[in-house]
């Protein structure tokens, strides 16, 4: 027989949680998952711009300091939680007229709430100060290569002054050799940052700063402007390509050459179009009459893996779309739409594809 009698007064019946409680639990779980995801994203998990995947001595120091700070913060957090739980447990088992403070509790609060956090914070401060020289060093004494990086709205202009090489959005360095990168800006404040190789450094109008890049191993390392600089700040990326010394020397030698002469009639027409239209007024192609300084140097544009400072991949289809209507790809870019016929655009695209 079913028991329909109500539960005695003061006794809570064991029932399943109500809908409101279920919703609260689900909301709490969703918030926890969101926070955890944000923390993992901030740590660079699965990201090719992770400070926790170091590839140089300075970035190793930065990653080590990050982990030590994380551990220190976890220790302090654990101490605070322990003190709170201790206070709650002790208060529950104590009569109402008992004194709220005892010598033991006071010692616990002073030790766990003052002394240990102070020791941890002082130690972390000392470690941070110790790491600064290796990451804040400017031009190293043994740097045999100097590169100049100029930030523009919105692309990166790269110069190798001693080798008379100019490129854009890709910075090649030899593995195992320190490279002094002098950074400057042609307009607003930018920030040069390659998380896997070193700290970020500001590019301030009228000032030239220097940072050292030295890769431990070959690879492609993603860089980014880390200072809001306008509409297309998010699409102002660049690549640092660390090559073995022999391959780097070959690349540098190839980049120093002027553009190859057109090998077909279509490419010759494309070159003539480039030189006689607004293209040549904004861009430079070594070996031609085009000597513009507004946009990137295109002497070897077809050899690059990205276009428009990382906005799109450098494929024939993407290049054609960029030439036809840059504003559709990157709104706010200084390059206007091209006013050419379909045939002229075909010849121009074909010519640009030969610039390797």
Image: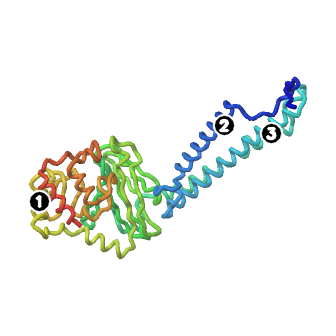
Task: Out of 208 and 269, give the one closest to the viewer.
Answer: 269
Q: Is residue 115 above or below residue 269?
A: above
How many other residues sit within 10 Å of disc 1, few (<14), some (14-19) or many (≥20)?
some
Residue drawn at (28%, 60%), measured in percent from left and top? Answer: 315
Q: Name the side, left or right, on which 58 lies relative to 249.
A: right
The image quadrant where one finds the N terminus is top right
Task: Out of 227 and 347, give the one closest to the viewer.
Answer: 347
Q: Which mark is residue 235?
A: none
Q: Which mark is residue 289?
A: 1
Kindly identify which residue carries mark 2. Answer: 25
Between discs 2 and 1, the one toward the N terminus: 2
Q: Is residue 88 above or below residue 137?
A: above
Kindly identify which residue carries mark 3. Answer: 86
Q: Name the side, left or right, on which 207 lies relative to 43.
A: left
Residue drawn at (24%, 48%), measured in percent from left and top? Answer: 326
Query: In whole angstroms, how far apart are the C-alphas of marks 2 and 1?
Result: 69 Å
Q: Is residue 172 above or below residue 329?
A: below
Q: Are marks 1 and 3 in contact (CB under 8 Å)?
A: no
Secondary structure beneath dot 3 equals helix
Is residue 136 at all visible to an observer of this figure? no
Task: From the top left corner, tell me how far across and down residue 305 is, in percent.
Answer: 32, 61
Q: Nearer the viewer, mark 2 or mark 1?
A: 2
Q: Name the side, left or right, on which 184 lies relative to 32.
A: left
Secondary structure beneath dot 2 equals helix
Task: From the top left corner, tell me how far across and down residue 123 is, in percent.
Answer: 65, 51
């Amino acid at each position: 027989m079913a028991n329909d009698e109500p539960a005695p007064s003061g006794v809570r019946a064991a029932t399943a949680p109500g809908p409101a409680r279920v919703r609260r639990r689900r909301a709490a779980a969703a918030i926890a998952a969101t926070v955890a995801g944000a923390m993992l994203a901030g740590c660079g998990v699965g990201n090719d711009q992770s400070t926790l995947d170091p590839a140089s001595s300075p970035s190793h120091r930065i990653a080590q300091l990050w982990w030590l700070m994380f551990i220190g913060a976890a220790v302090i957090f654990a101490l605070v939680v322990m003190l709170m739980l201790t206070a709650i447990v002790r208060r529950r088992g104590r009569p109402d007229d008992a004194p709220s403070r005892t010598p033991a509790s006071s010692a616990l609060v002073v030790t766990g709430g003052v002394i240990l956090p102070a020791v941890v914070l002082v130690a972390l401060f000392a470690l941070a100060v110790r790491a600064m020289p290796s990451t804040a060093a400017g031009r190293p004494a043994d740097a045999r290569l100097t590169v100049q990086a100029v930030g523009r709205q919105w692309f990166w202009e790269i110069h190798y002054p001693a080798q008379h090489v100019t490129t854009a959005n890709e910075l090649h360095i030899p593995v195992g050799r320190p490279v002094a990168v002098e950074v400057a800006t042609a307009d607003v404040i930018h920030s040069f940052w390659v998380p896997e190789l070193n700290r970020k450094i500001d590019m301030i109008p009228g000032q030239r700063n220097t940072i050292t890049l030295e890769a431990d191993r070959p690879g492609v390392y993603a860089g980014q402007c880390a200072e809001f600089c306008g509409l297309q700040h998010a699409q102002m990326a660049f690549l640092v390509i660390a090559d073995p010394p022999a391959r780097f020397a070959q690349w540098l030698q190839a980049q120093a050459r002027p553009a190859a002469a057109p090998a077909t009639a279509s490419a010759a027409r494309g070159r003539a179009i480039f030189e006689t239209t607004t293209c040549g007024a904004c861009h430079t192609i070594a070996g031609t009459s085009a000597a513009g300084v507004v946009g990137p140097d295109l002497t070897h544009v077809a050899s690059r893996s990205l276009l428009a400072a990382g906005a799109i991949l450098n494929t024939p289809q993407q290049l054609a779309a960029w030439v036809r209507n840059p504003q559709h790809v990157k709104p706010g870019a200084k390059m206007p739409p091209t006013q050419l016929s379909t045939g002229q655009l075909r010849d121009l695209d074909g010519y640009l594809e030969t610039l390797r």
